Image (cartoon, helix red, strand yellow):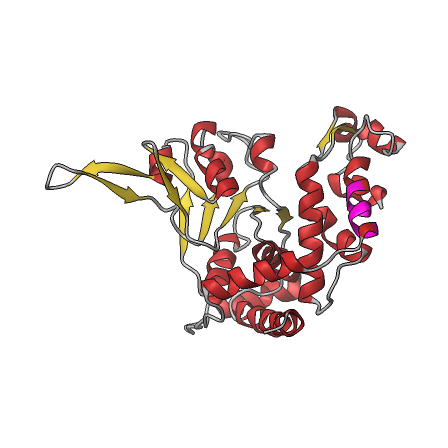
């Protein structure tokens, strides 16, 4: 199949995917769109929202519709790295046997990731970056495609361990979930309190998703679009000549080079999902908030004046 036909096939299948997800999930179109973007771009996503907004259900539904293996890890203060990665045990022949942990899956939902100490959070780092884990000196490759979708509660900070910047940077998107509208909530209550069972049909194979990821990497990008993305990221750095007074006033730290890479990958994916054969500046702007939100660090002045990351990112355009 030619790349042109493959992009048209991706557009068709993505529309069908969203219809499948809509059988279970009401509204949250922008959130679903960003999760789908990160999956086809080969990135990870962090979902930030208060309890009860169907974060877990959403990830479960998406993994069913994608036809991928899915595992959920509930992060708690007493969770150990071996609970995630797996451990070696002695079998009946007194030989060491490796029992795989839940990280060996296509989609891993790290539920309430900030509830566990840094030692356990770090168990995800190698898997997220290298798509492999090292246990007892042995290197284990993870099955592809591989995604970590983590959730975080922004309100309850007691007994939590904030994610270090190095780990936050490994998430392509930080996605904010908000309350549903009144009409959506009515629909949610109707559908979840009735005795009906909805089946989500798998639409993809793991190989198809991997092929689409390679297709997106082959999409050409004009130099001016790459330069725009890199300029946007440079503007977030207070010490950079390109940054404006607003950034210098309200930011302590800006985004690193991984933000520039992710902006282009996500812009390519955004263009492909719309049936375009090359991204433009509008595609970069469409994905910029989710990609930069967790990579910029506000100062005390921004907090005191109620300045949000979103307001700062909008000023960059």
In the rendered image, residue 143, in percent from the top left (x then y), is placed at 41, 52
Q: Residue at point 79% right, 36% down?
A: 234
Let me know if residue 79 appears in the view: no
How many tags in the picture?
A: 0
Let me know if residue 95 appears in the view: yes
Q: Residue at point 64% right, 48% down?
A: 176
Q: Residue at point 75% right, 38% down?
A: 308
Residue 227 inside the magenta-drawn segment: yes
Image vertical order of residue 187 relative to residue 221, above or below: below
- Residue sitting farthest toward the front: 2
Of 3 and 87, the residue lying toward us = 3
Of 92 and 32, the residue lying toward us = 92
Q: Name which quarter of the figure residue 237 lies in.
A: top right
Of 47 and 16, the residue lying toward us = 16
Q: Which image quadrant: the N terminus?
A: bottom right
Image vertical order of residue 224 relative to residue 208, above or below: above
Q: Residue at point 16% right, 38% down?
A: 95
- Residue sitting farthest toward the left: 93
Image vertical order of residue 67 relative to residue 312, above or below: below
Q: Is residue 114 left or right of residue 7?
A: left
- Residue sitting farthest toward the right: 245
Residue 226 inside the magenta-drawn segment: yes
In the rendered image, residue 254, in percent from the top left (x then y), is placed at 74, 32
Magenta stretch: dominant secondary structure: helix
Part of the protein shown in magenta: 224-230
Q: In this view, does 26 lie to the left or right of 249?
A: left
Q: Name which quarter of the figure residue 298 lies in.
A: top right
In the rendered image, residue 68, in percent from the top left (x then y), is placed at 44, 61
Of 280 and 222, the residue lying toward us = 222
């Amino acid at each position: 199949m030619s790349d042109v036909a493959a992009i048209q096939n991706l557009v068709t299948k993505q529309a069908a995917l969203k219809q499948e997800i809509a059988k279970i999930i009401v509204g949250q179109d922008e959130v679903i769109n960003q999760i789908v973007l990160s999956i086809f771009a080969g990135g990870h996503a962090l979902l930030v929202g208060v309890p009860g907004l169907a974060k877990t259900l959403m990830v479960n539904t998406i993994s069913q519709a994608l036809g991928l293996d899915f595992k959920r890890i509930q992060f708690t203060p007493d969770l150990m790295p071996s609970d995630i990665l797996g451990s070696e045990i002695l079998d009946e022949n007194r030989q060491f046997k490796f029992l795989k942990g839940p990280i060996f899956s296509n989609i891993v939902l790290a539920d309430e990731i900030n509830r566990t100490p840094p030692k356990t959070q770090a168990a995800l780092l190698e898997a997220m970056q290298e798509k492999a884990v090292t246990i007892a000196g042995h290197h284990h490759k993870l099955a592809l495609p591989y995604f970590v979708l983590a959730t975080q509660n922004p309100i309850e900070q007691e007994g939590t361990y904030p994610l270090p910047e190095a780990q936050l940077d490994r998430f392509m998107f930080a996605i904010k979930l908000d309350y549903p509208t009144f009409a959506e909530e009515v629909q949610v209550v109707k559908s979840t309190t009735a005795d009906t069972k909805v089946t989500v049909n798998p639409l993809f194979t793991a190989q198809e998703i991997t092929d689409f990821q390679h297709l997106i990497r082959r999409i050409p990008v004009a130099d001016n679009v790459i330069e725009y993305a890199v300029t946007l990221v440079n503007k977030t750095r207070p010490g950079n000549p390109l940054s404006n007074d607003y950034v210098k006033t309200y930011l302590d730290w800006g985004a690193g080079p991984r933000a520039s890479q992710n902006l282009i990958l996500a812009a390519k994916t955004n263009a492909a999902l719309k049936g375009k054969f090359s991204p433009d500046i509008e595609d970069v702007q469409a994905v910029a908030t989710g990609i930069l939100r967790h990579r910029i660090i506000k100062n005390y002045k921004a907090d005191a004046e109620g300045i949000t990351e979103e307001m700062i990112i909008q000023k960059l355009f």
